[in-house]
Amino acid sequence: MRPFTQHQGLVVPLDRANVDTDAIIPKQFLKSIKRTGFGPNAFDEWRYLDHGEPGMDNSKRPLNPEFVLNQSRYQDASVLLARENFGCGSSREHAPWALEDYGFRAIIAPSYADIFYNNCFKNGLLPIVLPAVVVDQLFRETVAAEGYALTVDLAAQTVVTPSGEIFAFEVDGERKNRLLNGLDDIGLTLKFVDRIKAYEMQRKQLTPWLFN
Amino acid sequence: MPRTLYDKLWDAHAVHVEPDGMTLLYIDRQLVHEVTSPQAFEGLKINGRKPWRIDALLATPDHNVPTTDRHAGITDPVSRTQVETLDANCHDFGLTEFVMNDPRQGIVHVIGPEQGFTQPGVTLVCGDSHTSTHGAFAALAFGIGTSEVEHVMATQCLWQKKSGSMLVKVEGALAKGVTAKDIALAVIGRIGTAGGTGYAIEFGGSAIRALSMEGRMTLCNMAIEAGARAGMVAADAKTIDYMKDRPYGPKGVQWDAAVAYWHTLVSDEGAHFDAVVELNAAEIKPQVTWGTSPEMVVAVDGRVPDPAEAPNAVKKADWERALQYMGLNAHTPISEITVDKVFIGSCTNSRIEDLWEAAEVVRVLAGSGHKVAANVKLAMVVPGSGLVKAQAEAEGLDAIFREAGFEWREPGCSMCLAMNADRLESGERCASTSNRNFEGRQGQGGRTHLVSPAMAAAAAMYGHFVDVREVML
């Protein structure tokens, strides 16, 4: 996994609550057996005017000019500003895969759905929680100033605005450590192999019917 | 100190706890389907790893499979590749798989309990958010992403932080025609789709005790739509009865030991919950969603709400967008909304009891000369598994549906998420027993109204929503 330390990037404001993972990456693209290549279909139904299917040449499809990601001032945005309960619904990890593949490195929202939040950390994508009033302020500032960029520092747990205003955010110590260092979860867990085996022996005694 | 059911399940599976509370949790069971597993198997292969415990895994294809004639196989080449990839991975790694034409194939959340693979007291995961379903068995069950699917395969464990605990207590008796689905939608209507975020929900109270295991599964299935990764119900005599003679369940002397353990799977008297929500079952009416989020729900005798009355500006904008997408006007009575298609199925409502409820409505209305209404282009019933389908056919339910004009299909996820050929066309309106009414969920531009099986059956016969309590008088 790509580590996340510091990132400065253009912000795009996605001003709607309860954005679900079906919207982030529609079901027809989940038929892929790969982890990559979902970026061109991120937000497919909002982003294009036609119906998308796997295998289409997305560069030839008509874009929806109303959709914020298509506006010229937000091209190459890498920080997604969102509203509450972002990433609700389906557990599909294709959602963070699509956002990461599109070019996002961080998301800022007042809250996330649990599974999506967890999935982001497995993919080098940092989901930042800031209070709703702060998110409101960032929405106003983003819309007001073309080229508005934020600096995210995971080690310091801060988001810094162009005017130098600093907002601190919380993140679990373990998740932070793994993301900062780009660590492989499975490799780390396998260091506990003796404990897992000891637990399993004990569990076989207590609930033998769960082992065949 | 008295403990909740969630505390007990959590404590029993904690292998190691980090200072910040991050816990290495042992996972007893994992269900596997074709959509969220190929990248996990690929990860194992790349790193030369093998599944930790083959007996803890059970696989079946469900999302992509056709619900019509299967003899020709899957015509969509992309869907076919995904299902064939699952078959190949299960073969290569030695997993048990119920392949597409196996009579036991079905939706993972239907076959797990049906086979006794899901058991009280286990931790169970699957790369699917509706894994919360299995909490109906006093189990800790939740959906995970594909990285975690691979992690569980490789280590039999997951890193998790404990959630808060929420008790949703429903006391009293449901009116005739009101079901577990209506409780689920009423709860979501009350607390919102993020109301359960950060919590594991335990459903309790006399109305929950009175539900069958199928009803409890419907309720726990929808916990995720309230934002809670896990929903659960304490074990009781119904739980234990359901487990009898299941192929993967305990047998002989192990059965007695298991039952003794299962009896402990309840919240202790006086256990602390971080949040409590109470509902009166008698006040719950049949529910119909009107918008593009499960929290956008009213009773069948209600009207489409007015965004001018939304509690805040963000919600007002959401409601306006939802009404536009749904092609509805504020103040329209729900009973005046007509439907183009009806879908009875999904991991929420495709078990035998769901089919009984729907068939009963069809039978009663057919008796007074009704058939599926002329304005309904398609009314389909998709059983949750091959075994549910076989039981329904043995009981003659398929004939009741077919004679009234429903299509009777092969088991799978079908039009809940439209990964196979079953879908809504743009602008089509559907009464659906599934779990999500998101934009585009059942097909781009499709308009979904979530209801119970009985309400969906009644909508099919009338061509518009009707109060099933009046039909069933």
Image (cartoon, rainbow, N blue to C red):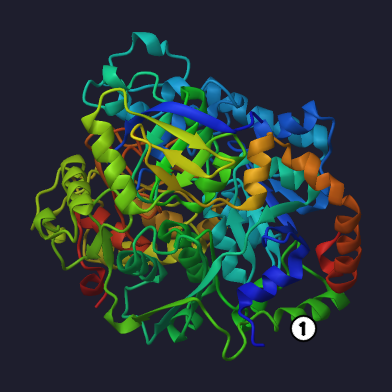
At 35% from the left edge and 64% from the top edge, which residue is drawn? B188
Q: Quadrant of the N terminus of chain B?
A: bottom right
- In terms of depth relative to the viewer, which is nearer, B106 or A69? A69
The image shows residue B94, relative to residue B231, as above or below, that is above
- Whether residue A38 is visible, yes or no, is no
* x, y percent for residue B433: 37, 55
* x, y percent for residue A92: 53, 40
- Whether residue B92 is visible, yes or no, is yes
At 72% from the left edge and 71% from the top edge, which residue is drawn? B11
Query: Circle 1 marks a residue in which chain?
Result: B
Q: Secondary structure at mark 1?
A: helix
Disc 1 crowd rating (10 Å Cα; few below 14, some 14-19, many 20+) is: few
The image shows residue A157, relative to residue B117, as above or below, that is above
* x, y percent for residue B421: 43, 32
The image shows residue B44, relative to residue A60, as above or below, that is below
- Give the residue number, with chain letter if any, for mark 1: B260
Q: Quadrant of residue B89?
A: top right
Please tell me how many numbered marks the rendered image carries: 1
Query: Residue B44 vs residue B36: left or right?
Result: right
Residue farthest to the front?
A164
Residue farthest to the bottom?
B269
Which amino acid is tagged 1? Answer: Ala
- In terms of depth relative to the viewer, which is nearer, B18 or B249? B18
At 9% from the left edge and 49% from the top edge, which residue is drawn? B329
* x, y percent for residue B131: 57, 55
Query: Residue A133 vs residue B83: left or right?
Result: left
- In terms of depth relative to the viewer, which is nearer, B273 or A176? A176
Q: Quadrant of the C terminus of chain B?
A: bottom left
At 65% from the left edge and 54% from the top edge, which residue is drawn? B125
